[in-house]
Image: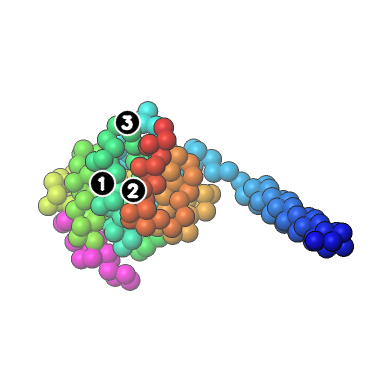
Amino acid sequence: MNRRTLLIGASALGLAAFGGGAFFLTRRQQLTEAEAVTPAVDEAQLIRDYSPSFGPDEAPVTLVEFFDPSCEACRAFHPAVQAIREEFPEQVRVVMRYTVFHEGSDEAVRILETARMQDKFEPVLNAILKQQPAWAVHGAPRMDLAWQIAAAAGLDLERAKSDRLFPGITAILNQDKADVEAVGIRQTPTFFLNGRELSEPSLDGLIAEVRSAVEST
């Protein structure tokens, strides 16, 4: 190899390195700028003291789900969330936030909250989601049927109907709506794992992400 070839080769390598370095710096600048214009999610907007939760408050891993009782995808993810709770009863805390995007969902939240007042939240939640196709009819939700489903799951219907307009429940609906807007929730379910939003996880992917978080603690 002669001197001319070496010089040409060295120049080409130098240009490639410069180009790669320029791309890296540009990409880094873009990421920095994106971070600057994207505000961090306020932890208080992810978790409220009143939010329904499962698992120890001091658990090292926290999974927050913004869910809509009328959402078909939320129903599909419910078994995965239950599987996470069963696999990691002490390591994971699951927090649920109400996201009322569908007609009738606000009334479904009132059903769940009156159930919580009677210590019947989980059985009523399971029943409401299991039989969701029967009552969460888009455009014409059958909330009377949703109440009956809750009653069959153990809800004292007479007491619940008198509690459904309790100011505390209205306050929860209003605050969760404000947090949904502040955090920028656009679809349900949306999950945050230890404060980090998970990007469109699959059912198996959600469990894998949580398992990885537990193993790294």
Q: Is residue 150 above or below residue 118?
A: below
**Element on which disc 2 rests:** helix
Does 207 sit left or right of 14 as displayed?
left
**Could you say which disc has been placed on residue 48 in the image?**
none
Residue 85 image-quadrant placement: top left
**Element on which disc 1 rests:** helix
Density class for disc 2 (Cα within 10 Å; few <14, some 14-19, many ≥20) is some
Does 170 sit left or right of 11 as displayed?
left
- The mark lying in front, picked from 2 and 3, is 2
Q: Which residue is mark 3?
A: 56
Check if mark 2's residue and mark 1's residue have beta carbons within 8 Å: yes
Does 19 sit left or right of 59 as displayed?
right
The x, y position of residue 57, in whole percent, is 36, 30
Lower sequence index among marks 2 and 1: 1
Q: Which residue is mark 1?
A: 83
Viewer-proximal residue among 105 and 209: 209
**Could you say which disc has been placed on residue 207 in the image?**
2
Viewer-proximal residue among 95 and 62: 62
- Give the residue at x 41% y 49%: 191
Q: Residue furthest top?
A: 58
Query: Bounds of the magenta span?
Result: 133-149
Tag 3: residue type?
A: Pro
136 inside magenta stretch: yes
- The mark lying in front, picked from 1 and 3, is 1
Tag 2: residue type?
A: Ile
Q: Is residue 135 above or below residue 56?
A: below
